[in-house]
Amino acid sequence: MGTGKAILWRVLPAVWALTFAAACQAGTINAHVTTSEGEPLTAAVVTAMPMGQTALQAKAGTKAVMVQEGKQFVPFVLPVQLGTTVEFPNHDPFRHQVYSFSPAKTFELKLYGGSVVSTVVFDKEGIVPLGCNIHDNMLAYIYVVGTPYFSTTNDAGESKLNQLPAGTYSVKIWHPNQKAGQGETRIVEVTGTGNTDVTVKVELKHGRTQRKPGAVDETYN
Ligand SMILES: [Cu+2]
């Protein structure tokens, strides 16, 4: 009898915790990102990290894709979670040679084309600028983050993070051409119900963008 009661008292808190967790709904963060002039900023990455949480690895088998097509990388900015395998399919009828010299991931894929799909696992948080040895105009960024909650702004500068468990988050906005040292961070409270709006202005420097294929590159085909 005494033992039974003791077990009950040990189990009850766990049952309550489970019931409470199940009752908790998920919230949404709606981010609106503009330049300092108030223009909508596309291709900015919005990440939400639960406060006090250390970097979270992606589930095993998580994949993302960075395409080469028309001598361009698509997308220009690809956010991925730590541990994600990125595929680099080439949709062009000629070959590419993708590389990065970044501290977060230094790699160089062999010259490839056709149905060969090269893959790289991104295992360190940070910014990975990509280039192609054959086509100088090609440029893209893989942004490796330690949270499953991330999204890129659309042409209207909007980004939605869904299914966030209620709690406090550190919300960060990153864009490849933002001014150095200007990692825009906000502390945001997400409740189980309704949306939380976050509005951020990002000051841009004169940054590099991906250029359209140029005459210089034509000779390397
Ligand atoms: Cu190329």
Image (cartoon, rainbow, N blue to C red):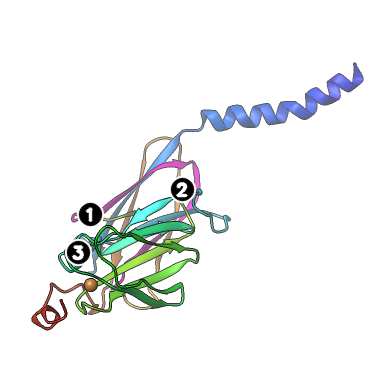
**Magenta region, residue range:** 154-177
Along the polypeptide, which appears first: circle 1 or circle 2? Answer: 1
Q: Give the residue at x 46% y 48%.
A: 189
Q: Is residue 7 positioned above or below 87 on the image?
A: above
Q: Amino acid at mark 3?
A: Gly
Q: Which residue is mark 2?
A: 189
Residue 218 x %, y %: 11, 78
> Looking at the image, which is closer to me, 28 or 126?
126
Screen quadrant of the N terminus: top right
Question: Which residue is depicted at the point 45% across and 63% down?
Answer: 122
Three-letter amino acid code of the residue under disc 1: Asn
Q: Quadrant of residue 33?
A: bottom left
> Callout 1 environment at 10 Å: few (<14), some (14 to 19), or many (20+)?
some
Q: Judge by depth and name the residue closer to the eye, 96 or 58.
A: 96
Provide the residue designation for mark 1. Answer: 154
Element type at mark 3: loop
Q: Is residue 164 left or right of residue 36?
A: right
Which of the two labelled residues, at mark 1 and mark 3, occupies the earlier sequence position?
3
Labels 1, 3: front one? 1
Residue 25, position in %: x, y? 46, 33
- In the image, residue 130 sits, relative to residue 69, either above or below, namely below
Report crowding for label 3: few under 14, some 14 to 19, many 20 or more residues within 10 A (C-alpha).
few
Q: Main structural element of the magenta stretch: helix, strand or loop?
A: strand
Q: Quadrant of residue 15?
A: top right
